Amino acid sequence: MLHDSAFLADLQIISNPVDSSLKCSGEACPRHGPNIHTLNGFDITPESVTKPFVRARFIAPLGRNGELMQTGEINVVPMVQNDRTVLEHLLKVLVADALALGKSINLDSNEALLRLIPVLCAYFSREELIDLLGKKVTARILELHQLEVVQNIFLEGRLQHLLHVFNAAHIPLMLFKGPALAHTVYPNAAMRTYHDFDAFIHPADMARANQLLTQMGYVFYEEYRSNTIDRHRTGYNYTLEQQDSWLKVEIELHTAPHPSEIGALFDIEAMWAKAQPITVLDQPALTMHPIDYLLYLCWHYRFHSFTRLLWLYDLVVMLRSVGPELDWMALIQAARQQQLATTLYYCLSWCRDLFGVDIPREVFVRLHPPLISRLIVEHIAMPDIAEALVLSRMQTHRIIAHRTMVDSPAGIFKVGLQTLFPPPTALARRYIDHSRLPVQLYFLFYVVHPWLTLAKGCRYLLGNRRKGRRSKKQVSYHRAHQIREK
């Protein structure tokens, strides 16, 4: 139940609620004319074709030969049907795996699909979801989707107010991820929901931002206990909670992309210099240049071990939006400078191979990863991309891919050392955050962690050998059974 009267008033602004009984369609909308199409209740308009970040509700898709379709001739059916087919296949992979293991699908524990629910509800009707997943899972999807819609309408109002206040105080914010993607490259903002706000801020503006947020009722909090010992800290978290509401607002201000074991080299000053103006909820803001944005999204997806399909779909939507005007050679050069060439290679290849995104072949030739990375990622960790990205039980495989996407053979040795001896903040976050031990005692785990990691590795290898033997026995049994039948 909702207890926020202000939020209930906000609900009145919804003019096009999603009708779950509607089917995905690329037909012209009868209410708005031939150049406006309806996708499961969403109005999609071709307002911007050439500029990637101009309040676009829809960016024209590419034609069969890679050419940009004319505004008056946009046909959203090929793109929509392709994404529906891909998503249907991924759902079938999930269902087949659950049936094989004799388990039910638990959306709450499947991070890969949980945040993709608004996209699924945009492409599939209730009846289609029931056919694919069953009544119980579909009911949970629709319930979670309703909560996402409710939360996002609430968050949009708070974000609009936040941007207005910061603009009045002349404190620039560079938005990224959720709201920035929803209001620039997605066909409709309702397809890309989010649970918090992320923004870059100049370090010199942090003190004023802290004062401003405090005056607005926000409270600073530590997301991780290990942040207190982080000498290279770049993230600062704030929350706004109200006693009469279950909804809350969370903001994370970043002075730079946070350090990670991946070791990517982001130049925050250059990112500010190339920042692009956008309009979000009628408020001016900034976001990253498309090249910086694509590299950041690839890095972020890998940093979280390719956990959520939504983050891959973010890349798909952005590539379709900026691809026709993107300087691919500049993207490749930037990826190499930031040690993200292999990461970019695999993220782009998944967008191409799964969702049919048109990417020049020359890009993959120039980004060609080292042989050892290809052997581990493609033949050991992720031989089946759909299974690896969708199934919860493939998390260990995704972590291996996350570790081994290096730009040079020597990088593998560096990865091995970092795996055994991670940075202090990573070690403290892993072992201290959920314990009662003082954070300052994190160094004790440098004795324990390498042995635990090696033990996990041995268990993984032994488990794979046993699975291989079982599968061989099953194949032999089936062959013998076929021979007897003949």
Image: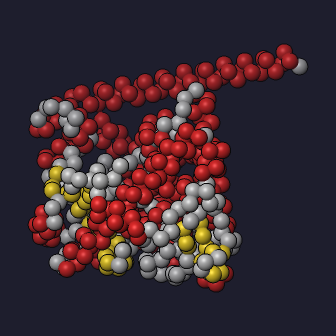
Furthest residue toward right: 486
- Residue under the point 57% across and 56% down: 20
* Residue 309: image location, x then y, percent: 49, 51
Compared with 93, 408 (above or below) is below
Compared with 203, 305 (above or below) is above
Compared with 87, 95 (above or below) is above
Relative horizontal placement of residue 333, taking residue 37 as reference (left or right): left
Q: Nearer the viewer, residue 321 or 374?
A: 321
Relative horizontal placement of residue 355, taking residue 201 as reference (left or right): right
* Residue 376: image location, x then y, percent: 50, 41
Q: Nearer the viewer, residue 98 or 353?
A: 98
* Residue 36 visible in image: yes
* Residue 203: image location, x then y, percent: 16, 67
The number of callouts visible is 0
Relative horizontal placement of residue 99, taking residue 317 as reference (left or right): right
* Residue 197 visible in image: no
The figure's colour scheme reads secondary structure
Using the rendered view, name the quadrant where residue 193 is placed. bottom left
Task: Classify the position of the C terminus by image quarter.
Answer: top right
Compared with 185, 385 (above or below) is above
- Residue under the point 30% across and 26% down: 451
* Residue 97: image location, x then y, percent: 59, 34
Q: Nearer the viewer, residue 164 or 472?
A: 164
- Residue under the point 49% across and 74% down: 57
- Residue under the point 31% across and 68% down: 157
Furthest residue toward top: 484
